Amino acid sequence: MKTILAITRKELEQYFASPIAYIVVALLMIILGIFFYIYLTLYMQQVAASAQYGGEGVDLSQNIMRPFFANAAFFFLIIFPMLTMKLFAEEKKMGTYELLMTSPISITQLVIGKYFGVLTLMFAIIVLLLIYPATLYAFGGHPDLGPILTGFLGLFLIGAAFVAIGLFTSSVTDSQIVAAVLCFVFLILFWIINWISRSEAWYGKALQYISIYQRFDDFTKGILNLNDVFYYVSFAVVGLFITGIVLQSQRWKS
């Protein structure tokens, strides 16, 4: 466990020793802040129109936080290929990968340590995102807490799946750019699967079972389904397992 924590700490130090993490996190907060402001403005307009015509109240969580979570998941698709591309590709480029492969560190420790490093960074990002629902409460809003909590849980789980894919793509190449592009392509394919899964045809319903985004939508509605949690955890475990196989085969060659 000490070895895994040491690798995790090393990864975090490398992230914050360069401006990449700061720039990516800052851009994410700014972009999501803009969307949050847009959704809040539209909500206020809907509330005013509803009051004017004597309509029913407008749900705060569903009109602001649900689309906010959907946008956050989309931008996770963009930023995590950039954050994971260096995990192994940079080691290979700098010539330190051979040292890792010949060191007494096990492949399992190496994979989990690097994975936890990015997960910790992702958790910090999610904590920063709490400022947006906190703003609603601070200014007298009363959003439903359930969909907010499940939304953030879903965001963490889908992010964990993204990181596992990024870890794998970084293990198969020595180019950070190639690793980022491969990861992005994989995630876009899953996004396309989500679109196709909305079809009423037989293949649409079949693809719903493997759609990584369809399951996330339930979290934003406040629905906590243990099958969805198991799906994301299994997705991440399979990604880490395949990464371990790739690294083990490379260790045998070195």
Image (cartoon, rainbow, N blue to C red):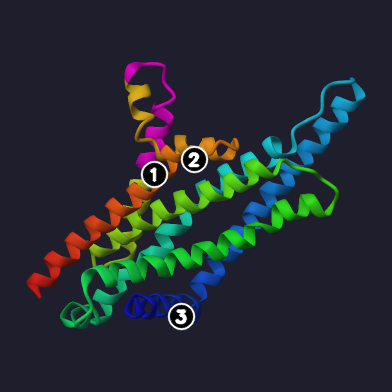
Instruction: State the SS at label 1.
Output: helix
- Is residue 194 one of those drawn in magenta? yes
Image quadrant holding the C terminus, namely bottom left
What's the amino acid at mark 2?
Phe
Left or right position of 245 against 232: left
Q: Residues within 10 Å of mark 3 (few under 14, many from 20)?
A: few
Tag on residue 230? 1
List x then y, in percent, for residue 179: 31, 60
Nearer the observer, disc 2 or disc 3? 2
Q: Label 2 vs label 1: CA separation?
A: 12 Å
What's the amino acid at mark 1?
Phe
List x then y, in percent, for residue 105: 23, 78
Residue topped by disc 3: 13
User: What residue range appears in magenta?
Assistant: 188-202
Q: Label 1 vs label 3: CA separation?
A: 31 Å
Q: Residues within 10 Å of mark 1 (few under 14, many from 20)?
A: few
Mark closest to the chain's N terminus, 1 or 3 = 3
List x then y, in percent, for residue 137: 79, 51
Tag on residue 216? 2
Left or right position of 115 against 137: left
Residue 178: in sight, yes or no?
no
Mark closest to the chain's N terminus, 2 or 1 = 2
Q: Label 2 vs label 3: CA separation?
A: 31 Å
